[in-house]
Image (cartoon, rainbow, N blue to C red):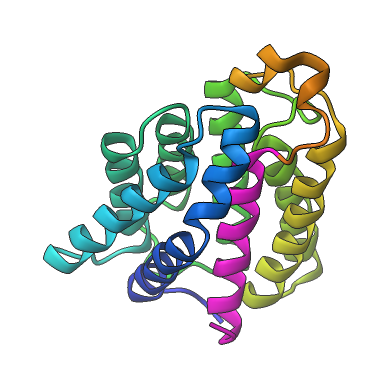
Amino acid sequence: MACSAHGVAVVMRAASQMLEEHRVELSTLDREIGDGDHGENMNRGFGALVAALERDAPDSPGGVLKLVATTLISKVGGAAGPLYGTAFLRAATAVKDASELDAGLVAKALRAALDGVIARGKAERGDKTMVDALLPAVQAAEEAAERGEDVPVLLRVAADAAAEGADSTVLVLARKGRASYLGERSIGHMDPGARSTALLLRTFADVASGAR
């Protein structure tokens, strides 16, 4: 199974719906250790993306990913806009002008997204950021691609790893961003960026498998 531009657009519309459903949860997580607007920001950004797709949907997967990037950079405030925007822009660059994304290209796109997030945010695994969810997801995706798994399986194992990574942020001390100002008081709270990363990957996996 490979994913066309239409398929990527369908995934992004599902992501927008998911973020509407989890808007309050994400903002609540952010309120506990940040400024409390992560859910609202992500929901607004993906809502604008759906509107942009309705106006003029690109005809390649890379084009859709680039539209995601530019929309999130312009519409999502705080650190999330530049970080997610960079992730999707790097993913778009990685897949170039491919007409469809197979498992190898999806893994390559995820790796490029991770590298972009690390380059922009200067975060490492264990800093209590979205890297804690995205890095294990990329590793799981690359292992799945090497085994010859298809896109739905690759995204499922990536989503599982991202969920475990997001859960792991509850017990660690924040070393990046506004949460780091709380010191020991940041322990006991899940990082909202790690949670939104895990939710996005779960949505991608559910759509690819037909579960959503």
- Above or below, comparing residue 118 to residue 4 in the picture: above
The reply to whether residue 142 is visible in this rendering is: no
Can you tell which quarter of the image residue 113 is in?
Answer: top right
The reply to whether residue 17 is visible in this rendering is: yes
Q: Is residue 202 magenta?
A: yes
Can you tell which quarter of the image residue 77 is in?
Answer: top left
Q: Quadrant of the N terminus?
A: bottom right
- Above or below, comparing residue 46 to residue 2 in the picture: above
Point out the residue furthest to the bottom here.
Answer: 210
Q: Is residue 74 magenta?
A: no
Q: Which residues are magenta?
A: 191-212
Mark count: 0
Q: Identify the residue at image location x=82%, y=53%.
A: 164
Q: Relative to the observer, which residue lies in front, 116 or 204?
A: 204
Q: Identify the residue at image location x=77%, y=63%.
A: 160
With 76 as the anchor, is 146 left or right in this view? right
Point out the residue furthest to the left here.
Answer: 55
Q: x%, y% of residue 199?
A: 60, 59
With 78 as the anchor, is 175 left or right in this view? right
- Above or below, comparing residue 96 to residue 176 in the picture: below
Q: x%, y% of residue 82?
A: 41, 30
With 170 as the anchor, is 49 left or right in this view? left
The overriding secondary structure of the stretch rendered in magenta is helix
Q: Identify the residue at image location x=74%, y=25%.
A: 124
